[in-house]
Amino acid sequence: MNKKVLLIIVILAIIIFMAQFVVGHPRQDFDGHFTMDVPFNCHYSNVAWCWDGGGLECRCEYWEDYAGCELSDGEMIVFYYNESLLCDDETSLLRQTINTLNKTYMYQVWPAEGDLMILTNDLDMKNVPPYLVGKESYDGSEIVFVGCRNLDDAKQYANTIEFK
């Protein structure tokens, strides 16, 4: 009897473990701007009201609810940019965003991987992610960056971004 119960528990655990890969990560709508997969049991809210222009001069900055202001391993931050941020003398949101991130936050551009832009810095600040992986909308009017301490995590989530 004990072996049968143990076998049933093991089989159920395997089924539950495998189901999360079949189902995938939950999707979240970010204020109607875009959707993307997020980690299980996480919800992200806009905290850009905390800073003028957000943490990285963005339109909206999304942190996991109750995460605090320090980025830990396994956590991510999502930065949303749109054309409303364009300066009068600039015509490209992408160019302006990259220039701001390069000058102000010392991000360096790495070679792109498909439609993903990759930026990195080595400032080692708790609230500024060392990796930003971004995706631009088809018309260039919006950009989303996913910031993480792990580059592979940032790429995984950025690959799921879909603009509305």
Image (cartoon, rainbow, N blue to C red):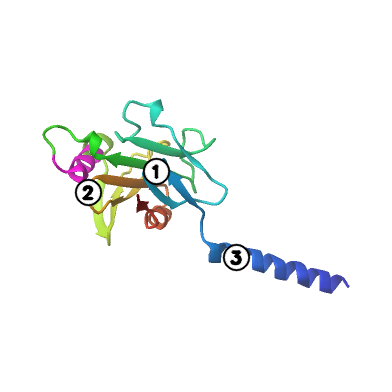
Most extreme residue toward the left is: 89
Between circles 3 and 1, the one closer to the viewer is 1
What is the number of the mark on residue 19?
3
**Which quadrant holds residue 95?**
top left
Q: Describe residue 79's horizontal placement relative to residue 75 as left or right.
A: left
The nearer-to-camera label among 2 and 3 is 2
Q: Amino acid at mark 2?
A: Gly
User: Which residue was labeled with disc 2?
Assistant: 140
Q: Nearer the viewer, residue 158 or 150?
A: 158
Q: How many marks?
A: 3
Residue nearest the observer in this picture, 57 or 74: 57
* Mark 2 vs mark 3, CA separation in Å: 36 Å
In the image, 156 versus 136, the foreground residue is 136
State the image quarter where residue 11 is shown. bottom right
The answer to which of marks 1 and 2 sits earlier in the sequence is 1
Marks 3 and 1 sit apart, C-alpha to C-alpha, by 28 Å
Q: Residue at x 57, y 48 (%)?
A: 41
Identity, as a three-letter code, of the amino acid under mark 3: Ala
Task: Give the residues drawn in magenta, as a range.
Answer: 91-101
Residue 90: where, in percent of width, then height?
13, 37
The x and y percentages for residue 36 are 42, 52
Q: Give the SS element for disc 2.
A: loop
| Residue at the spot 66% in from the left edge and 68% down from the top edge | 14
Which of discs 1 and 2 lies nearer the camera? The answer is 1
Disc number for residue 32 = 1
Q: Are marks 3 and 1 in contact (CB under 8 Å)?
A: no
